[in-house]
Amino acid sequence: MSLEQILKHLPFSPDCFEPGHVWLAGAGPGNLGSLTLDVVDAIANADAIVYDALVNADALNAAIDAELHFVGKRGGKVSATQGSINDLLISLARQKKRVLRLKGGDPYVFGRGGEEAMLLAQAGIPFRVLPGITAAFAALASAGIPATMRGTNRAIILATGHAPKSEGDVDWGALARTGQPVIVYMGLTNIAKISDALISGGMPPQTPASVIQSATTPDERILVATAATIAGQAVAEGFSSPALVIYGKIVSFRDELQSIIPIGVTQ
Ligand code: SAH
């Protein structure tokens, strides 16, 4: 059955996107299949879409009559400051447009969605948040690494490897001592420093580790090594952003699963 036919059978009734409202939405990790129905519907009904570099531009094909504002990085350069994005959102909303602020993954996970929601609230602009599949869980699924496994972990830690200087670094030693898997967003630049800090904090150097680049997209690449060797191998093999770094025994289930059956979609 085609998607069109399936949708006709689905009792999905989206909320009304009101003029002058801003919806902060997550476009998921990159593949179109990870878009939620709410987000596709919001793209179709928006008058203005303000989107980041990690949003798959193909998703914008669902837009019917929206003006498009790209505010992501291009060639490593920030094309719009957070201040100018904030001003744009407020001005579009005050023009009584239906404004869709579209971000990669989930807007509330390391995506400044919280800051933008706070700003809109303070400006008296009605907003709502449409969640998206965050990169960590999409990447784990794609790589065949279970996020939780009974007998292996009872928690999972999501951390950023790129905190603003004013906030100081994450206490990697404290995270290591929990014995729970650690997934680092924006961690590739500092991968050597983070791996060292986790190991000096008590993580066994042989702990399985992985780098997953561009998960769910045609550029997806997966590296598996150990906490001690992952940084060197990621550099040697030319891994680049966007990528996640994962430390923990859960990574070993990828090889175990793969030894039984190939992971991923077979054609
Ligand atoms: N809000 C986003 C995260 C934004 S921060 C979310 O919920 O996913 C940007 C970081 O997310 C990147 O540096 C990278 O660490 C991670 N990321 C985003 N998309 C990714 C992908 N497809 N594959 C691997 N990592 C990704």
Image: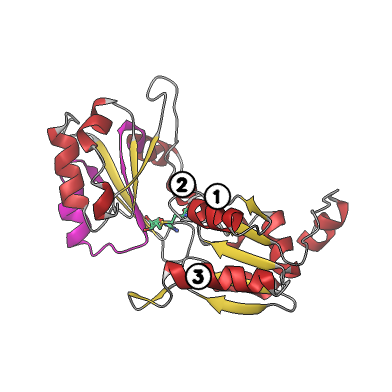
Label 1 CB sits under 8 Å from any ligand 1 atom? yes
Name the residue tied to disc 1. 133
The region drawn magenta spans: 225-251
- Which residue is label 3 attached to? 85
State which mark lies toward you, 1 or 3. Answer: 3
The answer to whether 203 appears left or right of 155 in the picture is left
Residue at the spot x=52%, y=58% of the render?
A: 116
Residue 114 location in percent, x, y?
A: 50, 51
Mark 2: secondary structure: loop
Residue 266 visible in image: no
Q: Which residue is mark 2?
A: 263
Residue count near mark 3 (Cα–Cα under 10 Å), binned few <14, some 14–19, many ≥20: some
Residues at badges 1 and 2 in contact (C-beta under 8 Å)?
no
Asked whether 247 or 47 is in front, the reply is 47
- Is residue 260 depicted above or below 46 in this figure? above
* Disc nearer the start of the sequence (3/2): 3
Residue 154 lies in the magenta-colored region: no
Q: Position of residue 137 (x, y in %)?
A: 48, 44
Amino acid type at mark 2: Ile
> Which amino acid lies under the numbered mark 3 shown in the image of this protein?
Ile
Q: Position of residue 198 (x, y in %)?
A: 19, 37
**Any magenta on residue 229?**
yes
* Occupied quadrant, residue 267: bottom right
